[in-house]
Amino acid sequence: MIASKTLTFNMEKKIVTFNIYRFHLLPLTSNSQQLELFPRRKITAREIREKKNSFFKTELDKLGNSRVTKHPLKLHDKANEIYLFKIAQKKVTKITRNFKTSKIDNEPYSYVIINNDPSIQKIAISDNIEAFSHPDVIKNILKKTFQKDLDKYGLNIEIEQLFDEASFWKYANQYKHLITYLNFQFIKPNLANISSSLPEVFKKFTEDVNSHESNIKIKAPENGTLEGIDKSNKNIKGLVEYASKGAGNIKLKVKKLRKILSTKENPIIVQADEISIEGAPEQVVKIFKSIVE
């Protein structure tokens, strides 16, 4: 089951499918830091958190036209805190003409939309199998690039895909008395509007030890199954809600089922006409705001 919505302007044109991710900007340490950008004094983690999106915006503005790597990146459009990039994959393609084979350079690309609004912090990555095998490949490229760029600000970035919360509860109901193992992987709270659902004890624990990515694993006894995996369990409900909004992933093991189930199999996707993305500026702004609102 994949949760999706379609923003349609011209059904005859090519449909572009976006996977939606949440990014988290986190201080590298909870202690004050001496940064090269601010040589006269140490910067506190609180100050870094307050300026995190401003720092990120500075790096996004520099990112515009990178041609020096294997994955050229071009700024296509922007409006306030929203950026639309194209990221390409350099390839060599063989073509045959008049019974002769030749090679030509080819750079198929995907779209990347980034909303740097501190209350949203979303990234939409289009699926183009000709360029990249999966949007996660682009996510990993961006993560590596941004982590390098943000290091001088004392910042780290984590990027996690949004999934449909209903998919977990479907698993939980379908295998209600058969679940033997659950693994909640979640990112340290970064956004007030989603972190409230994370149980306070887990929130405080990640803060105390400066963990940016944590795992909570629960396992049933041998020959037994887990109990209370339903919405009446406030801790389970909070973890599911928090993870689904772009802060992690959940894995389930079920009796007599070899495959480990994962919420990553049910990503949130949004579809749009390519002509809308490539169209007039006012139309472009409208469409990419709708995708990463």
Image (cartoon, rainbow, N blue to C red):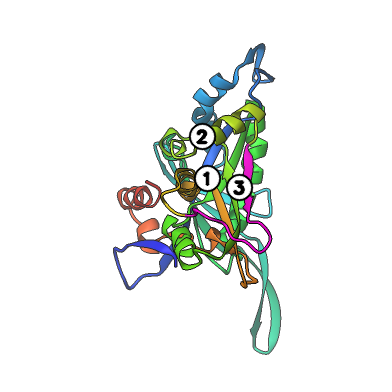
Q: Which mark is residue 247?
A: 1
At horizontal 53% and vertical 65% (from top left) the residue drawn is 128
Is residue 168 found left or right of 95 in the rendered image? left
Task: Label 1, secondary structure: give it.
Answer: helix
Q: Looking at the image, is mark 1 or mark 2 earlier in the sequence?
A: 2
Q: Residue 203 location in percent, x, y? A: 54, 33
Task: Label 2, secondary structure: give it.
Answer: loop
Q: Looking at the image, is mark 3 or mark 2 earlier in the sequence?
A: 3
Task: Label 3, secondary structure: give it.
Answer: helix
**Depth check: 251 or 82 in front?**
251
C-alpha distance separating marks 3 and 2: 19 Å
Is residue 148 found left or right of 192 in the rendered image? right
> Which residue was labeled with disc 2?
190
Residue 8 position (above or below residue 203): below
- Disc 3 marks a residue whose amino acid type is Leu
- Disc 2 marks a residue whose amino acid type is Asn
Residue 107 position (above or below residue 141): below
At horizontal 63% and vertical 27% (from top left) the residue drawn is 208
Question: What stretch of residues is rendered in magenta?
Answer: 212-229
